[in-house]
Image (cartoon, rainbow, N blue to C red):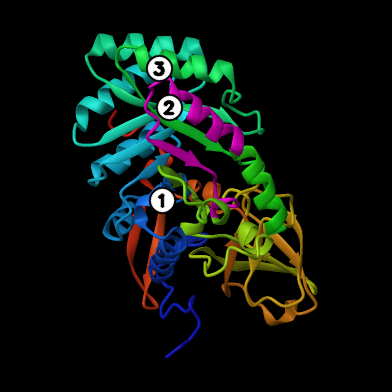
Amino acid sequence: MSTNPYAIADTSSIYSPGLIFFKDLIRKNIARLIELAGTGQRLRLHVKTHKTPQVVQMCLAAGLTKHKCATIAEAEMVASVGGDDAMISYPIVGPNCRRLADLIRRYPKCRFSVLADHPDAVEALSACLSDQGVKVDVLADIDMGQHRTGIAPGPEAVALYEQIARSPGLNATGLHAYDGHNHIENFVERQTTALSQLEPVLKLRDTLLKKGLPVPCIVAGGTPTFPVYARLDIPGLECSPGTLVLQDHGYGSRFGDLTGFTPAALVLTRVISRPTSTRVTFDLGYKAVASDPPAGKRLVLLDVPDYQAVLQNEEHLVIETPQASKFRPGDEVLAIPTHICPTVAMHQRAYVVESGRVTGTWDIVARDRVLNV
């Protein structure tokens, strides 16, 4: 029996470039997440990584009942397969306020929560939901230093939380503290930075509790700081990594402390040309793999020796290798994406491999911005 976790007995049904989910590895990654967190109830995995109902169901089967979403569509996907706790980690503004109300009515068994970081947004959301006769849980989004969204942990944050608590249609239910800018590779330095940035958040929580306001949870961190927060014994603390359920080369190669996770979503590509004696061209352009890493660093080709990526267009990947003569048109290679989350969103479906065989396909449902609501 092959020990290669990426062995596939028959690839004839896979159109390239084709996204492949290795189900056995996804299952192992989920188990490792629970092992590090201590219990599934301390995890709120980010579904933006996979956007797939079947992975949500795998999480539910493993006891992971809390989900973090980037869009209303992702939250609807979670609720549609039986999830009962979906947090939309994004400010809800404009027509999305009405969409949120419709979502709450459509899935009454699911607890939805959202973020807020500005008094005007709180006022508008309250007006809409109270007019629609529904309520939603709201977490104050705290700026940990990334300055993307959020409010600084201080007097203005206290006032915002008080506003949420007294607003019709809204329930103040905690704090969201995302430190997506903390990519320090050395664990000790990353831990020191994360804890120093968390301290003002904990002080904010204490201030709110002294005012008699409930703060039942703090949703903290992303993938790089997950091992920091997983070690903390803080009541109500929830860890919200995303990438690790599928894992990719970007985080896997940079953070040595994130051990026990295996890339579980790869892209199968085929040779389409050998234009020179040292060049090989694959059908893996940047329409099939995330292009936010710099050119030449967007993927790792497995079992291709001594190569350098020299060109990537929409549908082509060209490499230089002294072993080019070994490749023929139609030859297959697996690639590990550097950034898996946006790579998944580029594909309509993923081929599913289990025990070395293609068992079907899973639609990447929440790549769409609108489902039913």
Rendered image quadrant of residue 25: bottom left
Residue depicted at 63% across the width and 45% down the height: 194
Who is closer to the viewer here, 96 or 191? 191
Q: Which of marks 1 and 2 is nearer the N terminus?
A: 1
Is 346 on the left-hand or right-hand side of 251?
left
The answer to whether 173 is drawn above or below residue 224 in the figure is: above
Task: Name the residue beneath numbered marker 1.
Answer: 43
Q: Inspect the image, locate mark 3, and give the three-letter code of the amino acid beneath it.
A: Ile
Rendered image quadrant of residue 28: bottom left
Who is closer to the viewer here, 330 or 148? 148
- Magenta extent: 199-226
Residue 258 picture location, percent across and down: 58, 63
Is 138 on the left-hand or right-hand side of 154?
left
Q: Which residue lies furthest to the front in this view?
A: 210
Residue depicted at 24% across the width and 36% down the height: 110
> Considering the numbered disc 3 on the image, is that residue within a helix, a strand or a loop?
helix
> Considering the numbered disc 2 on the image, is that residue within a helix, a strand or a loop?
helix
Real-space Cα separation, disc 3 to disc 2, in angstroms: 15 Å
Residue 217 picture location, percent across and down: 40, 37
Residue depicted at 44% across the width and 77% down the height: 8
Residue depicted at 68% across the width and 58% down the height: 187
Task: Name the residue beneath numbered marker 3.
Answer: 164
Can residue 93 be seen in the rendering of this structure?
A: no
Classify mark 2: residues with Cα within 10 Å, few (<14), some (14-19) or many (20+).
few
Q: Which of marks 3 and 2 is in front?
A: 2
Q: Which of marks 3 and 1 is nearer the N terminus?
A: 1
Q: Which residue lies furthest to the bottom in this view?
A: 1
